[in-house]
Amino acid sequence: MEFGIVELSRLQFAVTAMYHFLFVPLTLGLSILVAIMETVYVMTNRPIWRQMTKFWGMLFGINFALGVATGITMEFQFGMNWSYYSHYVGDIFGAPLAMEGLMAFFLEATFVGLFFFGWDKLSKVAHLVVAWLVAIGSNFSALWILIANGWMQNPVGAEFNPMTMRMEMTDFFAVLFNEVAQAKFVHTVSAGYVTASVFVIGVSAWYLLRSRHVELARRSITVAAAFGLASAFSVVLLGDESGYSATHSQKMKLAAIEAMWETHDAPAPFNLIGFPDQETRETHYAIEIPWAMGLIGTRSLTTEIPGINDLVATAETRIRSGLIAYEALLDVRVHRDETDPAVMATFEEHSADLGFAFLLKKYVDNPLEATEAQIQAAANDTVPTVWPLFWAFRLMVGLGFGFIATMAYFFYRASFKGMNFPRPALHLAVWMIPAPWIAAELGWFVAEYGRQPWTVDGVLPTAMSVSALSMTEVALTLSGFVIFYTILFIVEMGLMLKYIRKGPYQDVTETEAWNKRHTDRLAGRDAFAAPGE
């Protein structure tokens, strides 16, 4: 494939998005875990829980700051590198981004300051409310971003206006409650909860291996293991829900993930492993699990899942239908108020396929002049490269089941073995810290790479979405982003490691006061004990 402005712009957005998502999952998960720890502190008044809240809250704050710095840049890229995309679908895509800024980011950013500087200025209950508002703001931020992204995957609640040549929103609630967006939201935040749980367990395991901050580490593992186990189950179950929604919203992505070239009789098998060959359209040495894909993808034993070859044929049909819509659109644009009703009716009949006609603009300026070979090439372009999707998905799923096993083990040891953890398990927990980030990045790769060649699935091809920039301009900004983000990442890692090595700050005054109260209670209980007890 020729490497041009489209591919370079895609690479830039992918790099910045994946850098940004190094910070997002930990922010989502730690915000909830910190709020849980402070809730226990308010309920028990035990200083160890305040110490835990402050320590993990400090690490959350470092990560939050870097997440904001990398996230703001991404939104500017829509106007910088993807200006036609912003023009074409800005009426829909801009709304959730604005809501994210107004409802979520300001809420989160406002209360973060109160969380860190309000310990001695707010009551315990008021500070706890602040902690939960920070957590809610973090998760609301993810919600609106994923509503925007979900619409790109499944564009509902909008229609094309031939007079303005733009997509316009027709049903805000359809966009808001888009099944793809809702499944992605819960799946993504659950993955963030798993990330934070693995992180907390790993850092706590490091302390236990060095016999440092033992009480804090044991309690942190107990909370993180319980929270992480529920979250890990949620990730797998909601990942399954995403697969089900893809069956009727993104059939090609699902077929590519499974390397399913031909349509199988229902219920389709699941390719556990194999080696996809895109040239011959075969999957070599495939090991199949009978019926599994049919059950996952359709929740039935009788519904077929179309294969890639049939979907390419469907795409070719839709391209030809889109050409009819495109020709009618030209007539509508020329005559405007005097458009023949029959022409408008023809456009409306085929308008759902207009985006498929736009696929031809990669090969010819006027899609109506496309040859049969170009139409066939455009239909074949609807197939993303299969082997990276196939293996990325399986590695992600394997890691997901690994997290369930890890969380279940630590939950069992914390709940039934007196919070005693074998040293090999502690070493494994430390080495597992990067694993959830790998799984999260793979998940986003599958979601975004699997949507190609579309920016908005079935509506706007990626090749049409880019700005009129030169290769040099995009290459320079890409280099700048990589250098700047790498520096930020190094700074974050340095700060995180510094505070982890330093360990939690212990409020000596509060600890001594609690110990005195506890001793007095025990002394009072002993005063009423019978002799010999």
Image: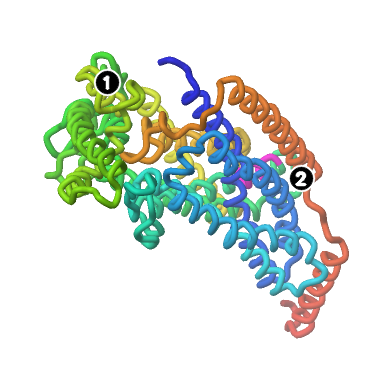
Is residue 445 rendered to the left or right of residue 77? Answer: left
Rendering coords of residue 12 (x, y %) = 56, 29
Residue 259 quadrant: top left
Question: Is 318 located above or below residue 242 in the figure?
Answer: above
Amino acid on which the number 2 mark rests in the picture: Arg
Magenta-colored stretch includes residue 248: no
Residue occupied by mark 2 = 212
Amino acid on which the number 1 mark rests in the picture: Ala
Rendering coords of residue 529 (x, y %) = 74, 82
Residue 204 quadrant: top right
Q: Can you tell which mark lies on residue 210?
A: none
Residue occupied by mark 1 = 377
Q: Is residue 228 visible?
A: yes
Question: Is 473 located above or below residue 199 in the figure?
Answer: above
At horizontal 40% and vertical 15% (from top left) the residue drawn is 1
At horizontal 46% and vertical 38% (from top left) the residue drawn is 84
Span of residues in magenta: 199-206
